[in-house]
Amino acid sequence: MSQTRRTFDASFKLQVVRLIKDQGITVSQVCRDMSLGETAVRRWVAQFEAEQLGQRGIGKPLTAEQQRVRQLENENRQLRRDNDLLKKASAFFARGLR
């Protein structure tokens, strides 16, 4: 028998991390109370700490600011690719005019 993999949204993860950080509850206690895996919760805490330091962290961003930063980075990457393509296309068509 295989168990289905549970998924949690960023707001839930952030709530769990805030329980640990703000209220001083241990990771083990939170995991027992909420039936969560300790490895996952420790990863969420590490992600949150990295985001607080302005780093990317591992996995999907937890805070709204980091989610927005990640979205803008992806958008910027796409615009750069589009710009490079347009440069190549204009150079190609400029050669044809000579």
Image: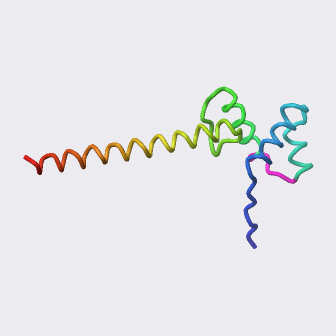
- Describe residue 92's horizontal placement relative to residue 85 as left or right: left
Q: Quadrant of residue 35?
A: bottom right
**Residue located at (75% from left, 37% from top):** 45
Farthest top residue in view: 53
Which residue appears at 51% of the width and 44% of the height? 74
- In-front residue for pair 88/6: 88
Could you say which is closer to the camera, residue 59 or residue 67? 67
User: x, y (%) of residue 61?
Assistant: 66, 42
**47 lies above or below 93:** above
> In this rendering, would 25 be left or right of 52?
right
Residue 7 at x, y percent in the picture: 73, 57
Q: Quadrant of the N terminus?
A: bottom right
Quick check: 70 left or right of 13?
left
Q: Residue furthest front?
A: 97
Q: Percent position (x, y) of residue 26?
A: 88, 36
Q: Position of residue 33 (x, y in %)?
A: 92, 49
Q: Residue furthest bottom?
A: 1
Residue stretch in magenta: 35-40
2 within the magenta span:
no
Q: Residue at x 11, y 49 (%)?
A: 97
Q: Indicate how the structure is coloured in the image.
A: rainbow
Q: Viewed as shown, does residue 79 lie left or right of 46? A: left
Q: Which image quarter: residue 91?
A: top left
Q: Which residue lies at the image location 23% right of the left edge and 46% below the top edge? A: 90
Q: How many marks?
A: 0
